[in-house]
Amino acid sequence: MSASKNIKPAKITKICCIGAGYVGGPTMSVIAKMCPEITVTIVDINKEKIAQWNGDDLDNLPIFENGLKEIITERRGKNLFFSTDIDQAIKDAQMIFISVNTPTKTYGQGKGMAADLKYIELCARQIATVATSDKIVVEKSTIPVRTAQTIKQILDNTSSDFKFQILSNPEFLSEGTAIKDLMNPDRVLIGGEQSKAGEEAIEALAAIYSRWISQEKIIRTNVWSSELSKLTANAFLAQRISSINAMSALCEKTGANIEEVSLAIGMDSRIGSKFLQASVGFGGSCFQKDILNLVYISQTLGLPEVAHYWENVLIINDYQKTRFAQNIISTLFNTVSSKKITFLGWAFKKETNDTRESAAIYVAWELLQDQADIHVYDPKVTVDQISRDLKLVSKGLFNGNEGQGTITIHKEPYSATYDAHAIAILTEWDEFKTYNWQKIYDQMKKPAFLFDGRNILDRKQLDTIGFQTYQIGK
Ligand code: NAD
Ligand code: UDX
């Protein structure tokens, strides 16, 4: 679908975004920065989060992203607002983005697989109830293909005569580089109804992005292609990591080196070099939930082979995390009971404070069940977050009681590694490469084990110092 020349879209001057999280916050901040004539109001039901977004301390924003606080400083109170008054913001806006969370269902039909759309549905009902004019509703959240139909049904079944157009505009930003990705995206995808009103809505949104993104990068499709493309993109990205991680296990058995293999295959232009970094396993709020969702959709549409194919991407990811934890236990003479194991990194990747589905959580829980004393240092993650993660992964079983391992959080790396039996690198933070590794070695128990789950350290240097080093796929 290409941009129609005869379409005259409405000019958007007021935007509302429901959901002030990792997507809503950065995305709307960038729109506010690039379109100073548009008033952008981000709303959320979480009062504390909105208070943090409005707070004076810009180092205490609810999320950490490089470049974000500078934009907040520049635009907040001018054309960028954070509020809990959802009804008012909906009434005022011509365009409403839905950026609420769509986690995996934890109950009832589709439990553990399907996307939980209750927050999306609530938003649609609220828009239907309070709208006092026509609206363009934009799905920014990642949702199963055909969700726009659900939103439309809710909106069209109100007693009012107002018209609603639903667009799908999935977000491809990656945490840690969100502002960079939003300022210079590979593409922007807009799916809309194939009618005059649908095309007008698409062009109204395209006009906003055109302020800083070139026309060739703005793709227009039908709604269902757009919805499915987001799940497909994440499935393909996750599949690459599981593929390279599966090969890393094979490398360890054969003497091949995964980095050499990655280099060799990545130079094939049909494959490409990105997303071939072997690791302790992928984490983050998106890959697992979106692939589970794809598996569920395939199952419910009677496509078990398709479901099975994608499920295996997740099985390899779980295998990689377990393999890493079990290697630590077996290398430390088959037990880590009462041994000090230091985790460097807890976030699911560098440059973010997000820990959702982080491999560190699963590795920690396996070691705690073997009664390890885990000491953690992460540059951005809070103590409270780590405790919440462990409660969740252990289904409430981890409470620091006798017979379980222990967890201690540190504010700097040298106390975290003092007297440790082993160190495990779980996140690829750049600062880990700059540490005084001789000093760390000197203060550790011997043999000093080091498990580099991100292959970021210089193996030769570590071996020279005296570490017993393990890296993925080598
Ligand atoms: P998040 O949990 O950080 O933020 C969602 C926010 O929505 C929360 O603050 C929550 O309080 C709020 N919310 C929920 N229901 C609400 C309601 N009825 N009214 C007002 N506020 C409500 O989630 P996120 O990481 O920003 O993800 C949002 C969506 O974007 C998800 O569908 C996700 O899959 C998708 N996505 C995420 C990323 C990412 O990197 N995090 C990237 C692309 C797409
Ligand atoms: C992902 C998608 O990349 C993004 O397009 C989508 O919009 C949201 O989900 P995100 O989860 O923020 O983004 O981070 P990403 O950079 O994709 O990393 C996901 C996980 O894969 C991280 O744990 C990362 O460390 C891991 N990873 C990534 C690898 O293990 N190896 C790689 O080569 C790349």
Image: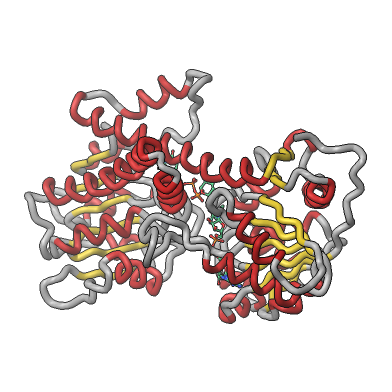
Q: How many labels were placed on the picture?
A: 0
- When asked about the image quadrant of residue 166, the answer is bottom right
Quadrant that contains the C terminus: top left
Picture coordinates of residue 164, whole percent (x, y):
76, 61
Picture coordinates of residue 57, whole percent (x, y):
62, 75
| Observer able to see residue 451 | yes
- When asked about the image quadrant of residue 409, the answer is bottom left
| Observer able to see residue 32 | no
Q: Nearer the viewer, residue 245 or 144?
A: 144
Side of 19 relative to 371 (left or right) = right
Side of 335 relative to 84 (left or right) = left
Position above or below: 322 against 254? below
Side of 212 relative to 169 (left or right) = right
Question: Could you tell me which residue is drawn at 32 percent across and 50 percent down?
Answer: 425
Q: Nearer the viewer, residue 172 or 341?
A: 172
Position above or below: 318 against 389? above
Question: Could you tell me which residue is drawn at 42 percent across and 24 percent down?
Answer: 263
- In this picture the colour scheme is secondary structure
Picture coordinates of residue 278, whole percent (x, y):
36, 37
Position above or below: 76 against 271? below
Question: Could you tell me which residue is drawn at 58 percent across and 58 percent down?
Answer: 65
Picture coordinates of residue 392, whole percent (x, y):
32, 68
Position above or below: 71 against 208? below
